[in-house]
Image: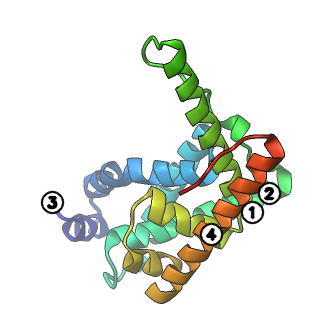
Amino acid sequence: MKDKELVEKALAGSQDAFAALVEKYRIKMFNLAFSLTRNREVADDLAQDIFIKAWLALPKFKFQSQFSTWLYRIAVNASKDLLRKESKLRKVSLEDSPPLTLMQEDTTNEFDAVQEDEKRRKLVHRALESMPEKYRAILILRDIQGMPYGEIGSILDISPGTVDSRLHRARKMLRKRVLQLSARLGGDYAVS
């Protein structure tokens, strides 16, 4: 069943229809929340909060955009609110991320490569965390979630041209921050 039909049924009172929407988007909302918070428990709570907000706001949905765009906008706003609240309490850190677990026995070289990849990933996430929200959000929506410019523009309420220019600045900023962190931490990481 298409989103529009599910939304119409949910608006008519069908909890099963809304449950189908939750099931369809729950992994995407969790991934977005995790990309922004880097904490599995917080991301899980945030994803649930996103769906609660969507359920409560559903009567205001006017079918002027796709349901997914509307839901992502709720998700981004809920994430911003949470990050603002948490930044007052403490900085979200990469140490909250679970440790890397190996799924198979590795030789020394493969293990070293995995460790090096993990260091690089942490470095990029640390650099990403230090970026202003408007640049971090656009990188996550485009480069991690793989969304098209038009949908990102709708979610963030900016034009596709602004998406393009902001994304260009965000990528440039991320490269610079990764290089600065790498130099400070004594590594040699290139970001393409």
Image location of residue 145, percent across then percent down: 43, 58
Residue 99 vs residue 81, the one in the foreground: 99
Label 3 neighbourhood size at 10 Å, few (<14), some (14-19), many (20+)? few
Closer to viewer: mark 3 or mark 2 = 2
Q: Are marks 1 and 2 in contact (CB under 8 Å)?
A: yes
Closer to viewer: mark 1 or mark 3 = 1
Reading the image, the residue beneath label 1 is 84
Looking at the rendered structure, the kind of residue marked 2 is Ser
77 sits left or right of 16 in the view: right
Reading the image, the residue beneath label 2 is 87
> Does residue 126 sit above or below 159 in this rendering?
above
SS at mark 4? helix
Looking at the rendered structure, the kind of residue marked 4 is Lys
Residue drawn at point x = 42 percent, y = 14 percent: 104
113 sits left or right of 174 in the view: left
Image location of residue 5, percent across then percent down: 19, 68
Which sits earlier in the primary sequence, circle 3 or circle 2? 3
Which sits earlier in the primary sequence, circle 1 or circle 4? 1
SS at mark 1? helix
Looking at the rendered structure, the kind of residue marked 1 is Arg
Closer to viewer: mark 4 or mark 2 = 4
